[in-house]
Image (cartoon, rainbow, N blue to C red):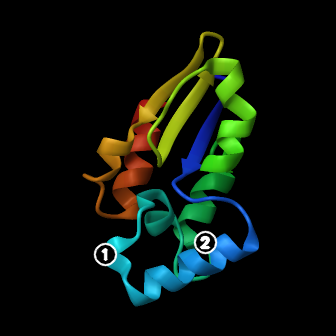
């Protein structure tokens, strides 16, 4: 496994980030990125997530869905549903945590445990 690729179900940019934060506050049940919801508070990264990332002994890449599509779509030709966690291997991209699995994850500790168990 060369690295983990985390892809948020959100587009990049300051305006998009502001709108996402606003949506989390105003109508959290309609927020569409479970990875964002689990790893970030309203405006900043959760401390437990930052600590996990920093202690992870594997290269990691964090992308918004528009960035992922620009960087990987032509190379691997996959159509993924976001959010998703992928492993880049010599064979390409392999799903570590699928979009559907994110619906079952209710807190950050469960997410961290799933990642640890699958890498």
Task: Using the image, tell me which numbered label, if any, was put on residue 15.
Answer: none
Residue at 34%, 64% (x, y): give it. Answer: 107
Q: Toward the viewer: 101 or 113?
A: 101
Query: Which quadrant of the figure has residue 70?
Result: top right
Task: Work out whether 74 lies above or below 65.
Answer: above
Query: Which quadrant of the figure has residue 33?
Result: bottom left
User: Taking the image as drawn, is residue 87 in sight?
Assistant: yes
Mark 2 vs 1: CB contact within 8 A: no
User: Counting residues from the N terminus, which is met first, the one under dot 2 or under dot 1?
Assistant: 1
How packed mark 1 is, by other alpha carbons closer than 10 Å (few <14, some 14-19, many 20 or more), is few
Percent position of residue 110, x then y: 34, 54
Percent position of residue 10, x then y: 56, 59
Residue at 65%, 51% (x, y): give it. Answer: 55
In this picture, residue 37 sits left or right of residue 42: left
List the single residue furthest toward the top: 91
Percent position of residue 31, x then y: 40, 70
Residue at 52%, 78% (x, y): give it. Answer: 41
Task: Using the image, tell me which numbered label, if any, was put on residue 45.
Answer: 2
Secondary structure at badge 1 equals helix
Residue at 66%, 38% (x, y): give it. Answer: 69
User: Taking the image as drawn, is residue 64 in sight?
Assistant: no
Secondary structure at badge 2 equals loop
Mark 2 or 1: in front is 1
Query: Which quadrant of the figure has residue 118?
Result: top left
Task: Using the image, tell me which numbered label, if any, was put on residue 29.
Answer: 1
């Amino acid at each position: 496994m060369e690295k983990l690729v985390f892809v948020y179900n959100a587009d990049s940019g300051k305006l998009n980030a502001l709108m996402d934060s606003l949506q989390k506050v105003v109508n959290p049940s309609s927020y569409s990125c479970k990875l964002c919801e689990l790893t970030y508070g309203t405006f900043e990264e959760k401390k437990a997530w930052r600590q996990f990332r920093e202690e992870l002994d594997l290269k990691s890449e964090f992308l918004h869905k528009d960035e992922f599509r620009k960087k990987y779509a032509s190379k691997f030709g996959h159509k993924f549903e976001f959010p998703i966690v992928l492993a880049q291997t010599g064979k390409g991209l392999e799903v570590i945590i699928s979009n559907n699995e994110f619906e079952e994850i209710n807190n950050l500790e469960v997410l961290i445990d799933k990642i640890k168990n699958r890498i």
